Amino acid sequence: MPRVFSIELSLEGDYDREIVAGVHRYVRQLQSREILLILGGRNEKPPDIRTSDMELGVITMLVRPADVLRVRREGVALVNVSGQLRHPQIVSVLPDDKAAGILAAEHLLERGFQDFAAFSCEGHCFRDRVAAFVRRVREAGHRCLVCPDRRSVDYAASVRRTAEMLIPLPKPLGIMCCTDTIGRSVIDACRLADLGVPEHVAVIGVDNAALIGGICSPPLTSVDINGHEIGYQAARLLDRMLDGERDLPLINRVPVLPVVARASTDTLAVSDPEVMTALRFIRERCCDAIGVDDVLDKVNVSRRSLEYRMRRAIGHTPGQEIRAARIAQVERLLMSTDWQMSKIAHALQFPDQAALCNAFQAARGCTPTDFRRRHRRI
């Protein structure tokens, strides 16, 4: 029987558009039945163009208790793609918000920051991101100030209040914002307060909203929450619901993608000049199969001294930092190219494909092929 997937999302935001693209990918790959997509808006029903022989399913965002009551009253097959409500007892496909917070923390920790702040806002998913960020920072032995959402309809006034909050905080400061929209306002507040980004304040957001991140000055680093895969999995679950499956899991988490690094965190908050030299060399030459001895040639301290100083500054030894930088390059190529493993191994100067796969498995707990399958958007 033909089906209609009614997508009640706005197309104004990147997250919404990625969900729609993921739904479309699922429908395009399906061979067993015809599925028609119709688009409405948030809280706005699209036109009902069904014929009597068509089944209806809905993909939407439930952000208010009234939304839950409405869909229960209507009794339609539905998948929710918003985490703002806590467990609405409706099948939901959501990003791994805690993992997003941890990734943001590790990104700033790797850059040597020791003072942190996090900007939260209303919604369980946003608070989960901030809580995970704060927990990871504290596990590393640092403090983190949690700042409430002070936005208002008057954007200029909101930016002024944020600037006043930032001025007395210790610098250099690493800031995590629970959304890219808040990240943009924090970058604007830094400019108003005459605080250089990223020299004095490094800012990382969550969502990887390309338009927002790109118009920020400097462009905003962000955690990609994988909206494309959320849309794909939402469509798959909705199809199963219409097949009559019961007892589907209510909360379905989709792995987030790695941090998309842009200029807002392109800095090293390290006061030790020898550690700074070592880190810059590792990041510039990690694709050249360098070893610790190559790093030592660039600094004026012994191996033992450099290991101690790097552990104190960033929590890694030189060897660990080299391996982490190389694995990050592997991830980048897995997600951005169709290269075979042998070509990636050659490009990054691993001895062979097996060496690359073994190193990746040890670092990420999965094979490169599995990583690519989970994180690619094609």
Image: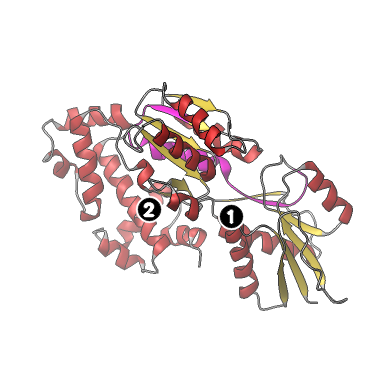
- Which x, y percent locates residue 151? 58, 35
Residue at 45%, 39% in the rendered image: 188
Quarter residue 337 falls in: bottom left
Residue at 30%, 32% in the rendered image: 269
Q: Within 10 angstroms of label 2, few (less than 14), some, or many (20 or more) residues?
A: many
Q: How is the image coloured?
A: secondary structure
In front: label 2 or label 1? 1
Tell me if residue 23 comes above or below residue 295 in the rendering: below
Instruction: Based on the picture, tell me whether residue 2 belongs to the magenta stretch.
Output: no
Residue holding disc 1: 13
Residue holding disc 2: 360
Residue situated in front as seen by the camera: 365 or 222: 222
Q: For this view, does 173 lie left or right of residue 155? A: left
Quarter residue 267 falls in: top left
- Which x, y percent locates residue 363? 39, 47
Q: Earlier in the sequence, mark 2 or mark 1?
A: 1
Which SS class for mark 1?
A: loop
Determine if residue 209 is in view: yes
**Highlighted magenta segment, given as a residue range:** 88-117
Tell me if residue 342 comes above or below residue 323 in the rendering: below
